[in-house]
Image (cartoon, rainbow, N blue to C red):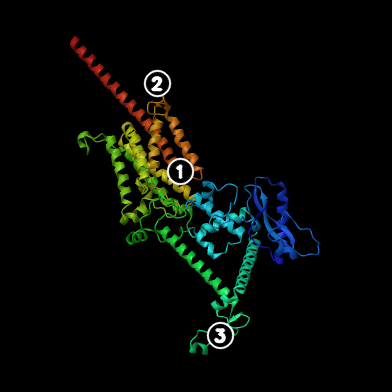
Amino acid sequence: MNCSLGVNAFRPGVQVAAHHFSKACSRLLVAAAPTTRCFSSTTLLPSRQWQANRGRLSSSTPFFGPSSIPRIAVRTLKFAARNRILIHYVDLPPNYKDEEGLPFRVDDLAAGEVLQLFGPGMTTPAANRLLKILHGRRVAGTLDDPVLKVNTAGYTPKDRRIALDYLRKNIHVDEVVNAGLRAEDELEALEKQQEEDAQAQAEGEDDVTKQLGYKSRFKVYEDDSEGLEESEKKKPEPQSVYGKSAFDAIRARNEAIWKEKLRKQEEERKKLEEEYKNGKAGPLAKADDTPKREVSAKRKEWEEWAMSDLKEPPKMPAWKRLLPSTVFVALLVAGFLTYSQLYVAPSRENRLWPDCPPAAATVAVLIGANVLIWFLWKVPVMWKPLLRYFLISPATPKAFSMLGAVFSHQVVWGHLIFNMPILWFFGTRLHDEVGRADFLTTYILSGSVGFLTSLFWLVLKGNFHMTTLGASGAIYGISAAYFWMHRFEGFKIFGLPPDPYTGVQGLAFIGLFGGLNIWGLFSKNHTMDVVSHLGGMVIGIIAGHLMEQKKKARLQGAGNTQLNLEDQKTGSGVLDTMLENK
């Protein structure tokens, strides 16, 4: 059973290529299963019987004639294996559409492969759709067809170039041969159309004569002088001395149809671009997505004012990018270590909020600072200083951003809402154990050193297009410090595990947090700054160890003082007894 491809015979100039394709197809035909799809093969028919047998002969009923008779290649469809990747024009299915394309491999690209190939700006469905469209055009020979560009207008030239390079590297397709075969079919279809039109005009001679105004006997050329003004008759158009032929009329009609088709496609393209700009649902959007609000002209002015004029990262060695931030963080470490040693907690009556516990007051101020910076990101006049000092950019790093980014969060509320409850939960508990000075030192240094670690990672890897911010590194630091100080104690979550089990030890939580971030470090799909998380955890563990030793020394000193007081009391009692005896 055959299914026709719907294309015409090759011209003699490309019969050799068609015969080459037919050999490969005939070998595949023997091994094909009954439940397979169609692929093309080639049947050689004698050119003398071509017109008579065109409708009833196929590759399953070959004509065996004398070898001296010239033969013409006829492309038909046979059964082929499932999931076969098409690379030849003769294999093009009859239901092929440019907007759907052709499969370029058995399975589509996974999310990780799309991220590695196109970067974070391309979704997985959009990437696979672009690859299918371009692979289909390579097979169909329409890569350079300007009419079809409307189907890929939503992609950037860079994305189209990356996709085409990937296909040319991994799927071998002879684009020149396919384009030539496509041109042969289109030319033959056009000639056939012209022949049919000419035949229809010959059959309806009277109607055609009346419509086109033929005056000659053979009805080949029309009289251009009829219906013209006298002045126009004196100045005939210098296009042709023979007048306007019937073929010229056919050509003009076809050109008018073609221009109308191009006009409609251009209108459709402009409509899609307008919908994309306004955020309406398009080919890459969900139908139930809410339209994006159009950006006002004033907002665009603020964005241009806040953004840098640099077209690319400035050329400089890595140490020049890292040295200022490293010195600033080193000064922060020295300053806060000194602060933790010299700080003396105020008495109750000297505190700003006497009725509020010190831990709650300190953590509430930190949360308030984070919320304030989050709101400032919504004020356009603050964009420029926030981008400079509260966002870490490895291309142009600023030293103060090592501290400012610790209090800065993304404009979307989810980042802030996720971090602040964790800061309250662990912050108040650690503050109650170690005091305000040691808690603030741990928080600030975990965040700053974590961001410095991330800056080193981004600069040395050359990822100058990335930025980072957030309190996650500082929160990981105080959490790691708290669990380290209770590393052998059991923690129950919602009363689980039940008694008599003691719960999960603090070391297990440290291992869990560290393992998740290390796994994310080597994952291609992560979007979090896991390097700053790991740097904050290391500082938190070091701080937890130092605070633990400091707490033991303080308790030991308090015990010695109590013993001295008891000894003094005992000595005074003995002296009183001796005096009484005297």
| Amino acid at dot 2 | Asp
Amino acid on which the number 1 mark rests in the picture: Val
Question: Label 2's element?
Answer: loop
- Residue at 77% across / 65% down in the picture? 70
* Pick the front one: 254 or 390: 254
Which residue lies under the disc numbered 3? 238
Q: CA distance from mark 1 to mark 3?
A: 77 Å
Residue 582 in view here:
no
Q: Secondary structure at mark 1?
A: helix
Dot placed on the residue nearer the N-terminal end, 1 or 2: 2
Q: Is residue 561 left or right of residue 36?
A: left
Q: Where does the image place residue 220, in percent across and percent down from the top left?
A: 61, 79
The quadrant holding residue 166 is bottom right
At label 3, counting other C-alpha atoms closer than 10 Å, the crowd grade (few under 14, some 14-19, many 20 or more) is: few
The nearer-to-camera label among 2 and 3 is 3
> Residue type at mark 3?
Pro
Which image quadrant for residue 21? bottom right
| Residue at left offset 65%, top offset 65% | 184
Q: Earlier in the sequence, mark 1 or mark 3?
A: 3
Residue at image point 53% right, 64% down? 147
Q: Earlier in the sequence, mark 2 or mark 3?
A: 3
Determine whether 499 is above or below 108 in the image: above
Give percent across and percent down for residue 344: 27, 36
**Which residue is nearer to you in this view: 398 or 33?**
33
Q: Marks 1/2: CA distance?
A: 38 Å
Is 120 drawn above or below residue 55 in the view shown?
A: above
Quadrant including the C terminus: top left
Q: Please name the residue that numbered disc 2 is placed on.
A: 499
Which residue corresponds to mark 1? 531
Disc 1 crowd, CA 10 A, few/some/many (<14, 14-19, 20+): many
